[in-house]
Image (tube, rainbow, N blue to C red):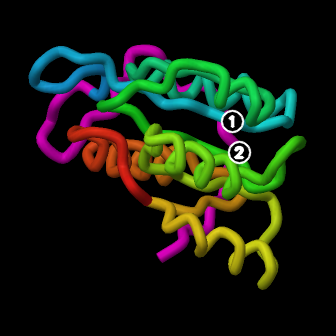
Amino acid sequence: MPSKARRSPGPAAPATKHRGAAGRKASSTAGGAARTVLVVDDDPSVLPALARLIRAAGLKVATFDRPSALLASEVPATNACMLVDVHLPEMSGIQLCEALVRSGRGLPAIIITGRNDVETRRVIARAYPVATLFKPIDERTLLEAIDRALDISKGSHTDS
């Protein structure tokens, strides 16, 4: 069920590491592979704030200000997820997720948006996201959603 967020993202205390339910460090799995979050948002104030929060949680982060930049990059096959804004230049965040699935590079996705209307919710439902978060985003809710998405990504690229 979609979560309603309350606070805008900001840097977390550097000494605090987000830990999953098993108490592991968020930055690696049992095998030591880096856990990576790919963030796609065209808002120049939101993108760096999200990146700081995710890094402060001990995760690797790659940021993209447009879908084509992510499509042209190497997408990790495992231990990764996407945090994607719905409304982007070039194509929607949903279309980006669909394009990655078609190319065999789909990852669990968390969808973020500043719009909470019927049409936006209808479009988001097509992507079957791990979570849908509304801006401003609650930091704890975001980190919990990322942890769930990364747990799903322990295998290989997803088909949905």
Q: Secondary structure at mark 1?
A: strand
Look at 81% across and 48% down and name the residue there.
91
20 drawn magenta:
yes
- Magenta part of the protein: which range? 1-25
Which residue is labeled 2 in the image? 8
Instruction: Bin the neighbour count of mark 2 within 10 Å (Cα to Cα): few under 14, some 14-19, many 20 and up.
Output: some
Q: Secondary structure at mark 2?
A: loop
Residue 93 in sight = yes
Disc number placed over residue 63 in the picture, else none? none
Q: Position of residue 138 (x, y in %)?
A: 59, 51
Q: Is residue 45 left or right of residue 73?
A: right
Disc number placed over residue 40 in the picture, else none? 1
Q: Position of residue 105 (x, y in %)?
A: 46, 38
Look at 39% across and 33% down and name the residue there.
80
Q: Is residue 104 above or below residue 135?
A: above
Q: Is residue 58 above or below residue 88?
A: above
**Residue furthest out toward the bottom:** 118
Q: Nearer the viewer, residue 156 or 16?
A: 156
Q: Position of residue 26 (x, y in %)?
A: 29, 28
Give the residue type that dot 1 points to: Val
Say which quarter of the image contains residue 46.
Answer: top right
Distance CA(mark 1)–CA(mark 2): 16 Å
Look at 34% across and 25% down and name the residue there.
35
119 drawn magenta:
no
Predominant SS along the magenta part: loop
Q: Nearer the viewer, residue 133 or 12?
A: 133
Instruction: Bin the neighbour count of mark 1 within 10 Å (Cα to Cα): few under 14, some 14-19, many 20 and up.
Output: many
Look at 66% across and 22% down and name the residue there.
72
Between disc 1 and disc 2, whose residue precedes? 2
Q: Position of residue 30 (x, y in %)?
A: 10, 24
Give the residue type that dot 2 points to: Ser
Q: How many marks?
A: 2
